[in-house]
Amino acid sequence: MEYLAAGGAPSIFAQMFGSGLIGLREGLETGIVVMILVAFVVKSDRRDALKWIWTGVAAALVMVVGIFLIIHLGTSTVTTLTAELIAGLASLVAVAIVTFMVLWMSKAAVHISSDLKSGMSEALVAGGASVLTLSFLAVGREGFETALLMVGYAESVSGGLWPLLGLVLGILVAVIVTVLLYRGAVRLDFHKFFLYTGIFLIFVAAGILSYGVRALQTVGWLPGSNSLAFDISEHYDQSSWYGTVLAGIFNVRPDPTVLQVVAWCLYVVIVLFFFLRANRPRRAAPPTSGSPSQAPAATDAGT
């Protein structure tokens, strides 16, 4: 990524902080899904199915790490321009899928808990393979979103492995929080957590989109590589602490092209509008007898 990193590589802290927050959010989403499945199996007195759940979770995690490493490390084996092209296309694909998941799941979160329980009820009757498949797909869906997002993010900040390390640390924190939630040791306002981290994710995705546009301009797939919207390089030190943080998390650079600025602004305005509209406060439904209080709230506003 020599061309786009010429302005100074983001600091290790910036790379790990941004990916760590992504890992925390996505890891907590995945943890909540696993928590719902485990709680349902335990309450159904089918602890024998737990091994199939954990096997499915492990298989999904292996798949996620494999996808990330194949795409991310694969770009280091080709020429610079080819790697630029791959990184640009991967960034656009990642932004498209993450945007779809953020907006779609904002609506689906309302009934995802009941869907998971219904699916697990049928899987328990069908056998261990069905339980394994259900947990693999439930976790793999979240993991696939995370892997694509991280590919775009990692390519936009450095091409190194620091973002992956930050992601792993964020996921470890999410695992600890999920265990504490399951044991009732802590409580969390899930709506606010997923609302604020969702907004953060939209701005991260906007930065990845901007990076992808610049990469495709560099290889000639998009026009306007020499048409700068502005250039504040003389007043904006990209190697300073704030420059590396903003570049590492949101891919901010002092000399964006016109097309980058247009793409960034349109993405933030449109996606943020639909995301906030989908997450408007809803009138609380009257409690029903026998319904758990933690799991349904856990998915509210999540992706």
Image (tube, helix red, strand yellow):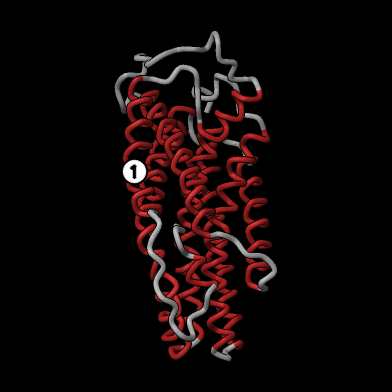
Q: Position of residue 213 (x, y in %)?
A: 37, 30
> From the viewer's perspective, is residue 12 above or below residue 178?
above
Q: Where is residue 260 in the image (x, y as percent from the top left)?
A: 37, 26
Q: Where is residue 164 in the image (x, y as percent from the top left)?
A: 61, 46
- Looking at this rendering, what residue extends furthest in the left direction? 223
Q: In which quarter of the image is residue 61?
A: bottom right
Instruction: Name the residue at 50% across, 54% down.
Output: 194
Element type at mark 1: helix
Q: Where is residue 170 in the image (x, y as percent from the top left)?
A: 64, 51
Instruction: Name the residue at 50% across, 51% down.
Output: 147
Pick whichever, 61 or 187, lies toward us: 187
If the image is split into quadrants, where does the C terminus sit? bottom left
Q: Is residue 146 left or right of residue 275?
A: right
Instruction: Name the residue at 51% across, 42% down.
Output: 74
> From the viewer's perspective, is residue 7 above or below residue 147?
above
Pick whichever, 175 or 130, lies toward us: 175
Residue type indicated by callout 1: Phe
Q: Name the residue under label 1.
A: 273
Instruction: Name the residue at 34% across, 43% down.
Output: 273
Q: Quadrant of residue 270?
A: top left
> From the viewer's perspective, is residue 220 above or below residue 45?
above
Q: Is residue 173 left or right of residue 39?
A: right
